[in-house]
Amino acid sequence: MRRTLAAVSVTILFVLSWVEMWAQTHDWMQLESGLDVRFVEAQQHTPVGNSRITVVGLDPGRWQLVFIGRSNTNEPHGLTAREWCARYNLKAAINAGMFGSDYKTHPGFLRSRGHTNSAQVNSYQSVAAFDPRPRSEAPPFHIFDLDEPGASLDLILQRYQSAVQNLRLIKRPGKNRWGQQENMWSEAALGEDSEGRILFIFSRSPFTMHDLNRELLSAEIGIVAAQHLEGGPEAQLYLKAGGQEIDLFGSFETGFREDDTNT
């Protein structure tokens, strides 16, 4: 029986003292069966913050990924990732992607089972798919590159009930696809490793996306594909498992909020 995680379009801080202890080990820490956390110390330090990247590894055979947001719950107001988890009995949450001016509609394609948050297909080249259709024999979770020969959203939806299209960070099988730039921000990202595990990735410390990709690819976490979810103060990650709690949100974003003071 799989238990439930969520990727949510939402906005959150603090890490309990156990994080400081485990952050020094650079190893995976198992919180529950099929649910691990690891803290990556960046080789290149960021201008503000602790230069630490939090990675949550999830076995999709044991944990079920779901989309929850205002478009399918009819919540009158946005919630923090922590609040989504508490209200809907979820184990962990991260942003599902960016959002439009209505604060609830994704700019790319986003469908979760029978609910379509956005039917808009744009130029984003990364699609995370989950909820395989019966008898499809598809893996429970997979990040697709739409520019691969024969790949298309239509074919993905023939195999999966849920899919979200986002900006690509890392192309399979581990290629940095974000050009270098001056802009940097706190980041929430979704990844897949070589074993097919779901990776929830978060850094409050700001990186350019080119540099973040380089850090992830050199961190020996097995990452093969990743997509950008959200940046700046809106980026979030929440996890409560194994008697431990992580409650993180971003701050820095070039040209928007160039500091680490968001509380």
Image (tube, rainbow, N blue to C red):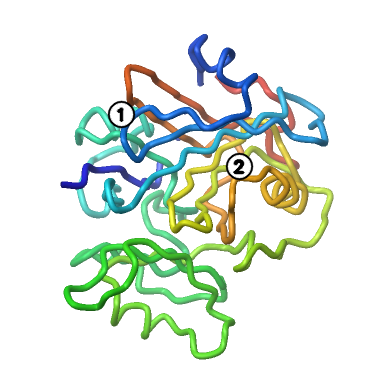
Give the residue number, with chain letter if any, for mark 2.
Answer: 187
**Where's residue 107, x and y in %?**
47, 64
Tell which of 245 and 217 is nearer to you: 217
The Cα–Cα distance between marks 1 and 2, rounded to whole angstroms, is 20 Å
| Residue at figure coordinates x 46%, y 67% from the top left | 165
- Judged left or right of residue 103, residue 54 is right
Question: In the picture, residue 260 is in which quadrant?
Answer: top right
User: Is the residue 67 above or below the residue 87 in the image?
Assistant: below
Question: In the picture, residue 154 is in which quadrant?
Answer: bottom left
Q: Residue farthest to the top?
A: 17
**Where's residue 261, x and y in %?**
65, 20
Give the residue number, with chain letter if any, for mark 1.
Answer: 83
Tell which of 17 and 204 is nearer to you: 17
Check disc 1: other Cα within 10 Å, few if <14, some if 14-19, many if 20+: some
- Judged left or right of residue 183, residue 197 is left
Q: Earlier in the sequence, mark 1 or mark 2?
A: 1
